[in-house]
Image: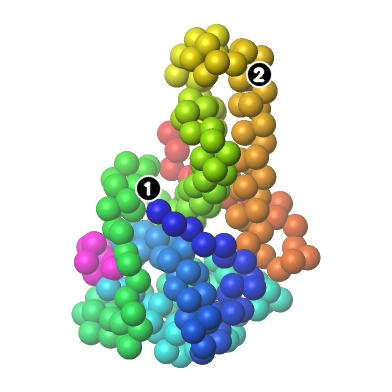
Amino acid sequence: MTFQTTRWSLILRARTADAAGRQALDDLLAAYWQPVYAFFRRLGADADAAADLTQGLFAHLLARDDLATVSPERGRFRAFLATCARHWWANERARAAAHKRGGGVTPLPFERGDVESWLLTEPVHGLDADAVFERRWAQTVLERALWQLEQEELAAGRREQFAVLRAVLDGQAPPEPWAVLASRLDTTEGALKVAAHRLKERFRMRITTEVRQTLADDCAPGQELQELLTALSQGAP
């Protein structure tokens, strides 16, 4: 899994018609297709139809140059995309979406396995499609933040330590007593607990960074963070 940075600069660059704009668009849509796909699945589309609808929506946005209407001053990209998905569902049947699929645009490399597994295991059955979109968006933010954190840890040569401490990022206890883990990693129990605390702090910072990515530069991420937590709590037992 590879995630690209998705800031407003990337969104604005995706509006251009050159090669850099095309790459920016690919990166942008690759990061945001899963909430849209989950939205269509919750509305009743099967996996193939949801993929066609999702691909068709993004092709439609490009063909109509709708990204040219997006700007930080007009609101969040996530809200723009959700609105587009609702309109697309209302105006297009799965057959029409499949017929228009691609629209001269290279198809996105959908990996439906992950999101299909998510739909089966997540408590989304009592939620409407909008809530599923929000929940998948929130999960995507967490996954992107976790992936970035993992890459940093691997680059720093802390692969084994990260594998051991990964559970604490979910609020769980470590897989074994701290003393046992510290001995295995050739460190002290105190040092390992400090490392765990710092890892959790960096994870929170990464989440905040991800939330900021489609906000205007002068917007505080507080509301978005609260919406993320709300989305994650929806449908939870």
Q: Is residue 210 left or right of residue 170?
A: right
Q: Which residues are magenta?
A: 44-51
Residue 45 in the magenta stretch? The answer is yes
Label 1: how many Cα within 10 Å (few below 14, some 14–19, many 20+) = many
Task: Identify the residue at image location x=71%, y=68%.
Answer: 216
Is 143 displayed left or right of 199 in the figure?
A: left
Residue 206 at least partly seen? yes
Q: x, y percentage for residue 176?
A: 46, 14
Farthest residue toward the right? Answer: 218
On the image, the x and y values in percent for residue 11 come to 58, 74
In the rendered view, would you say 55 is above or below 151?
Answer: below
Which badge, 2 or 1, is on the more N-terminal residue? 1
Disc 1: which residue: 124
Please give the residue where the numbered disc 2 appears in the rendered image: 191
Q: What's the CA distance linking mark 2 and mark 1?
A: 40 Å
Q: Judge by depth and name the residue closer to the eye, 114 or 79.
A: 114
Does residue 75 sit above or below 174 in this rendering?
A: below
Kindly identify the amino acid type of the residue bearing the numbered disc 2: Ala
Q: Is residue 69 above or below residue 30?
A: below
Looking at the picture, which amino acid does disc 1 mark? Val
Q: Main secondary structure of the magenta part?
A: helix
Residue located 45% across and 85% down the image: 62
Is residue 86 found inside the magenta-colored segment of the image?
no
Residue 108 placed where, x, y %? 35, 71
**Image location of residue 67, percent across then percent down:** 54, 82
Vertical arrangement, residue 188 with respect to residue 29, above or below: above
